[in-house]
Image (cartoon, rainbow, N blue to C red):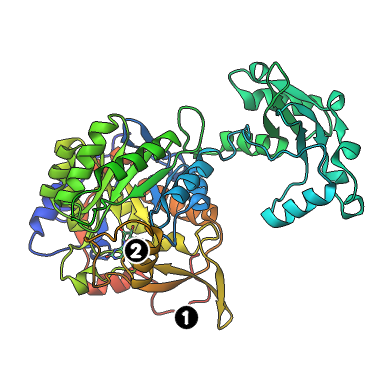
Amino acid sequence: MAVARNSTFDDPFYQPADEFFPANNKIGLTFDDITLATLYSEILPRDTQLDTALADLLHLHIPIISSDMDTVTESRMAIAMALNGGLGLIHYNMPERQQLSEVSRVKNHVHGLIQDPIQVFPHQQIGDVLKTIEERKFTFSTFPVVDEKGKLVGLLSGHVVKPRYAAKKISEALTPRAQVHTITKKELGRDPIARADKFFTEHIGIHKLLVVDDDDHLHGLITMSDVERITQERKAQFKPARDAHLHLICGAAISATRNAFGELNRDHILNHVGALVERGVDAVAVSTAHGHSRGVGDTVKMLRDAFSKLPIIAGNVTSAAAVDFLADCGANAVKVGQGPGSICTTRIVAGVGIPQLTALYVASRAARRKRVTLLADGGITKSGDIVKALTLADAVICGGILAGCREAPGDVMEIGGKLYKKYRGMGSIAAMKEGSAASYGHAPDPARKVAPEGIEALKEVAGSVDRVLAQLIGGIQSGMGYLGAANLAQLREKARFIRVSPAGQREAVPHDVVELKTGN
Ligand code: XMP
């Protein structure tokens, strides 16, 4: 049944972006300044699709990216983001070698086959193995046993890796080769998970399957728990974000570093990005506070020339001219946001920056013309902000909302009976100091800032990324249901905006009650 809109009364109040923002062009607006009008809907929240394509080779199943900050995204966060269908951007406030291994950790995570399983040798003692487990904090105790040429000799089962056998040699304790279940790479075929799943069903009580080549060299290990997790994922509404080889996707941030003479460190940047590409990185983000600048433009151009297919994210900007500039340089996605972040002081220190929704509107019109995508970066504190951001952008970047999660780097600390994690701006004094330490051995970057533009803060511990994202996704789907939008393109097209008065803002949050439990 088609339901006509009563456009005579509604239209002057609830305006599409192209009427609303130009009509409010004398004032910078951000999330709480506006609200979205509800529209006739036949769409149930659970049926909405959240897929977003940020570049030809960069597809996410949910439009959420974790920020490239040293208290938000390292491999654990990036893995959790990708498993939920999003993307993590590994920060660059660490030695480059370490950033490469962080990317490798994500790319090699549970894709069914563990390609470099930890191996042990027949001459070692069980005590040696126990020591390694303790030192490297392994959560498993079954290991393939190989000879010095990498040929499979047997399996050391967790049942015998016990202190009472510490003095025994592995050769005395192993399950011999003839009794170990193996499969060849060829036999695994095109769908290793389905093949392994069948194997585990057929072999009661066997939880590990070793993969060998025709000469019996060990090539990998498949565990039943990984297979079960992946099979489960295949049934979830939002599938993990994987590349063409079924590896989880992962992004990495880089900076436009300069040498002692103030020139762009071309060779250095190219070598590092080349190494990231070799590790399988799915996108690089040229991340700076001022993306509309020669250094960022030259870096993006240089990377585009060198890596024609690599998805490049660049930013941050808040104007249409800046989007045009970065698009012309070769960026695929542009980060919008100068000063909206929860730990940012750019607006106070430098007196610059634009409230986020106005910035997003202006940038989005240039992005549409240039066929680049937009990432709304910073200032998101609740799912409703994400719905509003997605009326103008293709995805959001979140820092603070994820920084309290268990997967964010850093330890949990207890203060006054409450648990917290540290969250700090990348332009804070502490983060900048760490950045200098990370680039130890290189000339200090002459572009490094003197006045900090970020603070150090604490976030209350928020549980797992799965839980936080489930809440956020639920909110986004709910918003889409209210607007009758089945997907993100429809959300952008259907959104109708109205400004909210200060009294309207107070009305929007719980009021005139004593709150017993928060919504979370
Ligand atoms: P939220 O609001 O999600 O913001 O915590 C995260 C975003 O803030 C930016 N960022 C900074 N901005 N000074 C700034 O002005 C800083 O020190 C700083 N550190 C991070 C960044 O865009 C991030 O994604």
Q: Quadrant of residue 356?
A: bottom left
Mark 2 within 8 Å of ligand 1, using the beta carbon: yes
Amino acid carrying label 1: it is: Val
Q: Residue at x 35, y 63 (%)?
A: 436
192, above or below 289, in the image: above
Residue 49 seen anywhere in this rendered image of the structure:
no
- The residue at which mark 1 appears reads as 514
Cα–Cα gap, marks 1 and 2: 37 Å
19 horizontally vs 96: left or right: left
Q: Residue at x 83, y 26 (%)?
A: 177
169, above or below 199, in the image: below
Residue 18 seen anywhere in this rendered image of the structure:
yes
Where is residue 409? Give x, y as percent: 50, 60
Q: Toward the viewer: 475 or 150? A: 150
Q: Residue at x 52, y 48 (%)?
A: 80
316 horizontally vs 156: left or right: left
Q: Toward the viewer: 162 or 33? A: 162
Mark in the foreground, 1 or 2: 2
Where is residue 98? Give x, y as percent: 47, 50
Q: Say which quadrant the N terminus sits in.
A: top left
- The residue at which mark 2 appears reads as 426
Amino acid carrying label 2: it is: Met
Q: Toward the viewer: 261 or 7? A: 261
426, above or below 291, in the image: below
At label 1, counting other C-alpha atoms closer than 10 Å, the crowd grade (few under 14, some 14-19, many 20 or more) is few
Q: Which mark is residue 163?
A: none
At label 2, counting other C-alpha atoms closer than 10 Å, the crowd grade (few under 14, some 14-19, many 20 or more) is many
Q: Residue at x 64, y 39 (%)?
A: 229
Mark 1 or mark 2, earlier in chain? 2
Where is residue 158? Give x, y as percent: 82, 44
